[in-house]
Image: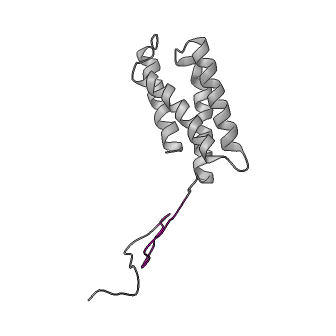
Amino acid sequence: MADAGGPVFHGPVHNSQIAWGSQEVTQTQHIGPGPAALDDLQAAVRALLDGIGELGLSPADAVTLRADADELLDEAAADEPDPGRLRRLHARVRAVLAALATGAVTGAGAGAAQLAQSMLVDVQRALP
C-alpha cells in the first residue's frame, strides 16, 4: 500500500516546486544565474572581447558585437543583474557567434569559424 503522507524523493531535488493534494495550483518560479555562473560568463565575455578582431567581422558587425558584449559584461557585473536583460544580451552574442561558427557570415575564414565555435561553447556553458 502506498504511503498517503506525501511525496517521497529518492535522490536530490533542486529548484523544484511541488503541489500535493491541491485541486487548483498556480506556481511561478524564477531561477537566475548564481554568482559562479556570472563569474564564468564574465570570463567568457572578456575572452570574446579580446578576440573580436580575429573573427573576421565587418567593422560595423564588430562594433555591434563589442557593444552587446560590453553591455552583457556590465549587466553580469551588476549588484542585481536583470535576468531578462542577461538572457537577451546573451542570445544576441550567441547568435553572432553561431552565424560565424557555421560559416553563415561572408568573409569569415575557417580559422574565424573555429574561433567563433570555441567562443560560442564558452559563452553557452557560462549561462545556459
Q: Residue at x 48, y 32 (%)?
A: 120
Front-most of 95 and 44?
Answer: 95
Q: Which residues are magenta?
A: 14-29
Q: Residue 68: x, y in percent? A: 62, 29
Q: Quadrant of the N terminus?
A: bottom left
Front-most of 14 and 37?
Answer: 14
Instruction: Please identify the quarter of the rendering in which residue 77 is found.
Output: top right
Front-most of 84 and 107?
Answer: 84
> Which SS type dominates the magenta stretch?
loop
Q: Residue 124: x, y in percent? A: 49, 39
Question: Is 97 positioned to the left or the right of 45 in the image?
Answer: left
Asked whether 21 falls inside the magenta stretch, the response is: yes
Asked whether 94 falls inside the magenta stretch, the response is: no
Instruction: Please identify the quarter of the rendering in which residue 3 is found.
Output: bottom left
Q: Residue at x 45, y 71 (%)?
A: 24
| Relative to 19, residue 44 above or below | above
Question: Is 82 positioned to the left or the right of 105 in the image?
Answer: right
Front-most of 105 and 55?
Answer: 105
| Relative to 91, residue 40 above or below | below
Q: Residue 49: x, y in percent? A: 62, 27
Q: Residue 18: x, y in percent? A: 45, 71
